[in-house]
Image (cartoon, coloured by chain):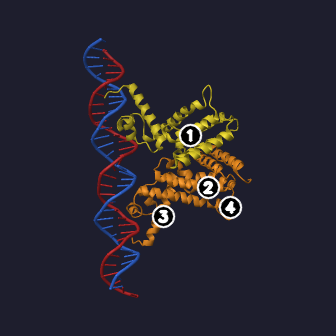
Chain colours: A orange, B yellow, C red, D blue
Amino acid sequence: MGHSQAAKAGSRERILAAAAQQIREGGLDAVSVGSLMKSVNLTHGGFYGHFESRSELIAQALQRALVDSQTAAKPFVDRDRPRTFAGMVKQYLSAGHRDRRGNGCAIAALASDVGRADERSRAIMEEHIARFMEKVGGLLEDESGDSAIVAMSAMIGALALSRAMTDTKRADEVLNTVRNYLVEHFGPDET
Amino acid sequence: MGHSQAAKAGSRERILAAAAQQIREGGLDAVSVGSLMKSVNLTHGGFYGHFESRSELIAQALQRALVDSQTAAKPFVDRDRPRTFAGMVKQYLSAGHRDRRGNGCAIAALASDVGRADERSRAIMEEHIARFMEKVGGLLEDESGDSAIVAMSAMIGALALSRAMTDTKRADEVLNTVRNYLVEHFGPDET
DNA sequence: TGTACATCAGTGAACGCGCGTTCACTGATGTAC
DNA sequence: TGTACATCAGTGAACGCGCGTTCACTGATGTAC
């Protein structure tokens, strides 16, 4: 064995990153202490050297999942040559995004779960929803922010519906229809 | 004790109805055999006289939740004097609907859970999504059905976002903004 | 730089608990006469 | 209609299992000299 202090920080990081991905994939209840620790090649007992409790881990993993997926989306809103609203919507409402939950938008993945969770989780989620809305709003011309609210609602709903379907054709149709609508009605620029 | 055959059907019905409501409130994982049976004043052992397994119950309760919430929505689409699209949207995107999950739309409540569930559950959900889209489409003038897809996505997303928030004002704003947008842009009639 | 010791990251057995499921049992219901 | 018996809806103890959590222990790391 033998484990340096520096290694500890790395372990914590791996645990948290794994938890964040796993809750994006399977929801807030999908992570158990035992399976999580095993997934980063540690034993369950060591968990409590890093986190006070499972519920503390879940709160931090939720925050982490939201930050991670926001970071992944950054190229669409922050770069020197910023992407357009249309570009963002196309990516968000793609089959790829729908099918790779573990790396996808944590708001869409977890909004429903968090709606049933404690106030702390909802506060964390709310902050990230507001942040995302601002970013979407920044790509739009509507300064009231109303368009961002409508567009974001439609995107999250479409993703949830598409993920709940078995028929790929129908699932794709939902994404495409909402994508086309948003690009046409909200996009400040064409394409 | 002593239990007639007629009573058995009644028991099954109560178990299923309770399960359907509980999964609308807490998601597909929220129902345990023990607590469910206790909630209808029976003991856990009797459960297997009614259902083959917990997973069989969940599938039937999902179906039931979807049927129940569709029935509850019927006044908006089926009555002699049918409600308008605007009327339906106002009800759907109301604070009351958001706050009373147990009696609300099961598609919105469970779409996200079902997205991670087995194919059987997704097939059940898909059928009800299609049915609901048709009904919404029937209230709209757009014969392609595209408007129904967009409207439904926006409604489900708005409900999910609103439920995930702690700040009531912000949560209400999401509902109101999407509601106003849909009524204005999709409603075939005014108000 | 080399040795002696304290620290502490991670291990793995053990805990109490609730889970889904099984099953021997109870006693009112429903039937045969 | 009244009695005897089979049925079977519901009971509750018991099962194996995985959960979150605790804790005595191990041995490399980091420090004091």
| Residue B95 sits above or below residue A140 on the image | above
Give the residue at mark 2. A134
Of tags 3 and 4, the one toward the viewer is 4
Label at residue B94: 1
Few, some or many residues within 10 Å of mark 2 (<14, 14–19, 20+): some
Question: Going from the N terminus, do you reach mark 3 or mark 2 first?
Answer: 3
Disc 3 residue crowd, few under 14, some 14–19, many 20+, Cα 10 Å? some
Residue type beneath disc 4? Pro
Q: Nearer the viewer, mark 1 or mark 4?
A: 1
Query: What residue does disc 4 label?
Result: A82
Disc 1 marks a residue whose amino acid type is: Ser
Whole-number angstrom distance, CA of label 1 to CA of label 3: 42 Å
Tell me the quadrant of the picture where the N terminus of chain B can be found: top left
Label 1: how many residues lie within 10 Å, few (<14), some (14-19) or many (20+)?
Answer: some
Q: Distance of mark 1 from mark 4, alpha carbons?
A: 36 Å
- Same chain under badges 1 and 4? The reply is no
Q: Who's the residue at 58% across and 56% down the image?
A: A131
Earlier-in-chain disc, 3 versus 4 = 3
